[in-house]
Image (cartoon, rainbow, N blue to C red):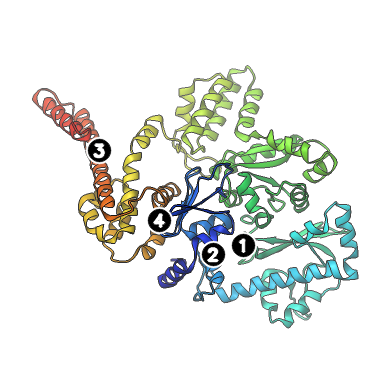
Amino acid sequence: MAGFGDNKIEEVRARADIVEIIGAHVRLKRAGRNFTGLCPFHNEKTPSFSVNAERGFFHCFGCGVGGTVFDFVMRVEALTFGEALQSLARRYNIALPERRDGASGGAPAGERDALVQANQIAAEFFQHVLWNTHDGTLARDYLVKRGISMETAKAFLIGFAPARPANLAAVLDKRGLIEAAVKLGLVKREPGRPPYDMFRARVMFPIRDAQGRVIAFGGRVLDQRLPKYINSSESPLYSKARAVYGVCEGRQAIARADRAIVVEGYIDAIALWQAGFKETVASLGTALTVEQLRLLTRYTRNVVACFDGDAAGRKASLRALEIFLAAGLLGRGAFIPAGYDPDTMVRERGAQAFGELIDGAELLADYFLREQATAAGASMSARAAAAGRVAEILRMVANPFEFDLLARKAAGMLGVGEEILRREARKPGQTQSGNRAGRAPVPIAATAAARADGVAQAGVGLIAIALGYPALRAAIYAQAAPAEIEDRVIGALLEEVCLSDEAQASLEIPVMLALSDEQRGRLSALMVGPLAADADGARKLVADFSAALARGRRRREVESLRRAAATAGLSGDDAAAAAQAVIALRRQVHGG
């Protein structure tokens, strides 16, 4: 798991005090067996966030987020499990073995550490030049001209690369990091000449990951040289398509505001952050990617992208819609008035004007529908063509409720039949972004999912009891019949826990990693809330949950018999016998 031994994971889990870790982000107060506070993952005025130190779980009864100490660190710092494990291990001085991390492009831990160290030294070097040397004078004047305060510049680690060709190269060579610097693109090396600096006479913008590690740099000239900006090359630490500028500085504000504002460049992000919009990030000068949006969804599902208000900017917003949908988001667009960019708008027209623009940002899907309807006009052929384009977009909408609302709105705006539009949107096929079509469930599927909620809760509830009460695992296995649970993941996990003699701490991590976000929320709610306080209460819950699973199995048998009878076209005595079987099973389902 994550390239580390299970024993080390258990050691970190045992040593990490969940109340201490969460207490660094949330003001907690004891309330009986739990600690409560305001949830850090959504805005609330009445505390609905609980931590149970005894069981090692947290849960918010407002937004449904919950889990172990690892889940909390992963969410609040936007880390993978392996990164959260390392973060906690460092905090509690636990040595972890070196590993090969597939997520880092296969770089061994020792090599990766050298790359991180080289970038950190480079950032400190550039900062020193900016603030403490004559070479940084022009850069300091530039920051003043752009309205960036010293406090803000230091928060973003802004620096300056001197014009001399081998200053940084010499510093890194003395530290034995020249090979790492070459791999990162900080230093160039050519036959017949000594290593020389890649960035020279440029204001330097370090790009950090969510943990605060410098993974790359952007550099801007102060004269008319081209290119105006150059960025670090791709490396084991950095992928331009996946990194987001400002995520380190803005991640907690994004979670608190439940919103991310996305701009294009470094200066725009910094200016908005300074003006109070600390939930701002930048897409590193390129169009947004699915990977960047998925990174932001660790903090919020509400993303507002800023576009130029001209025709090109509006076309860009329509292209961005598919990227948002591929990431599972609708997304909103804010169109900056002509003659401004986010930086100049907030400086010249004020934070209030920019805030009103962001608050009024329109759903990209709504803008797309309005553009299609307007362009089609009254022409029948044009409306039919527009309906085809809308169906292609609807095909990418995964959320059934969003699909339903958009399909209704689109049919009304285009003057086409709603059922025809829905049918076209559900046809098999692929959109331009490669997402499988037909992902929006039909209403009957949504109804079935809602009806099965009690069964799903029962399966997760039995896992919770099996984790907390090892003595009951044999009884749970016998009563619940894990192999017959419809959700194969839940059934397999329940069987694994019931057949194990290990303690909760050893089993909960693989269980939590295997569950979906919704299932993790259900489990954590039980762990901090109504899970039985003693074995007798737990036995009663086992009986109740097992009965719910049994009813679910009988309900599936009823549906199976009904379908079989309908397919076979039975008549006479055979039809009567089938009907009697269905009636008998229904009575069992409803306890009659």
- The N terminus, quarter of image: bottom left
**How far across and how far down the image is residue 421, in percent?**
49, 26
Q: Residue at x 74, y 73 (%)?
A: 188
Q: CA distance from mark 1 to mark 2?
A: 9 Å
Mark 2 burial class by Cα count in 10 Å: few <14, some 14-19, many 20+:
some
The answer to which image quadrant residue 576 occupies is top left
Q: Are marks 1 and 2 in contact (CB under 8 Å)?
A: yes
Front residue of 95 and 39: 39
Q: How many tags in the picture? A: 4
Q: Residue furthest left?
A: 573
Residue 83's mark? 2
Residue 448's mark? none
- Up the image or down, 502 lies above or below 523; here it is below
Query: Residue beneath label 1, please?
Result: 211
**How far across and how far down the image is residue 580, in percent?**
13, 28
Q: CA distance from mark 1 to mark 3?
A: 47 Å
- Up the image or down, 166 lies above or below 267; here it is below
| Sequence-first disc among 2 and 4 | 2
| Sequence-first disc among 1 and 2 | 2
**How far across and how far down the image is residue 337, in percent?**
79, 35
Secondary structure beneath dot 3 equals helix
Q: CA distance from mark 3 to mark 4?
A: 25 Å
Front residue of 27 and 281: 27
Q: CA distance from mark 3 to mark 2?
A: 42 Å
